[in-house]
Image: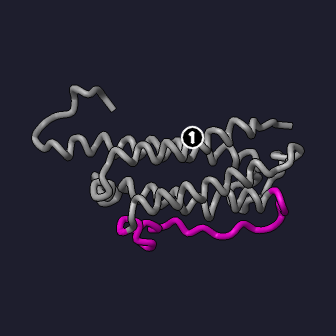
Amino acid sequence: MSRVDVAAIIGRLERGAAAVQALCAVASAQRARWKPAPEHWSILEVCCHLLDEEREDFRVRLRSTLEDSARPWPALDLVGVAEKRKYNERDLAATLDEFVRERRASIAWLRSLAESTDFNTAYQHPKFGPIYAGDLLASWAAHDALHLRQIAKRLHGMAADDAPGFAIAYAGEW
């Protein structure tokens, strides 16, 4: 039987939201729309994705798994989601505010779970097989880390874009 350090993950989720806000504050609202290439997401698009994931994925699926592991998860259509939902036309500050509000609701819900919550409860995913509640909780924090790295990479690329004709090699290798 696997164990989950729920308090550590909750702390990381709380700090993750603050880290997203802090990293995004480095770019202006306009520069947050910048993309190094059309197929890449901007900082704003990453933030919109984080908001949608907070509302539609991790909390929803973890709750569903814990309440009734046989209940099918709601479908997620992530193909072309940034274009379909016009992420890059949204307001960065409003998106971040909504993300933080949703994250606070998630944290409150996670804190409300009983100490006896069984994170070994598994949802039988039709494609991936068993996905445990603990998998979802750990993946939630890891998902933040992946997108913090993505935002940092956009800021790195933005430095080069802001100084065309000059190199950023002196900064060190990415």
Q: Residue furthest right?
A: 116
SS class, disc 1 = helix
Which is nearer the eye, 14 or 70?
A: 14
Q: Quadrant of residue 138?
A: top right
Q: Is residue 137 magenta?
A: no
30 left or right of 122?
A: left
Give the residue type at disc 1.
Arg
Q: Quadrant of the C terminus?
A: top left
Crowding near the residue tagged with mark 1, few <14, some 14–19, many ≥20 C-alpha atoms within 10 Å: some
Q: Residue furthest bottom?
A: 84
- For mark 1, what is the residue? 15
Which of the image's four quarters has the N terminus? top right
Query: Seen from this angle, which residue lies furthest left?
Result: 165
Magenta: main secondary structure equals loop
Asked whether 131 or 27 is in front, the reply is 27
Residue occupying the point 20% across, 46% down: 161
Residue beneath the point at 71% across and 46% down: 135
Q: Is residue 79 above or below residue 119?
A: below
- Which residue is found at the position 52% from the left and 44% from the top? 18
Looking at the image, which residue is at 49% across and 67% down?
79
Does residue 77 appear left or right of residue 111 in this picture?
left
- Which residues are drawn in magenta? 66-89
Left or right of 78? Residue 10 is right
Residue 34: x percent and y percent?
28, 55
Q: Position of residue 139 (x, y in %)?
A: 64, 46
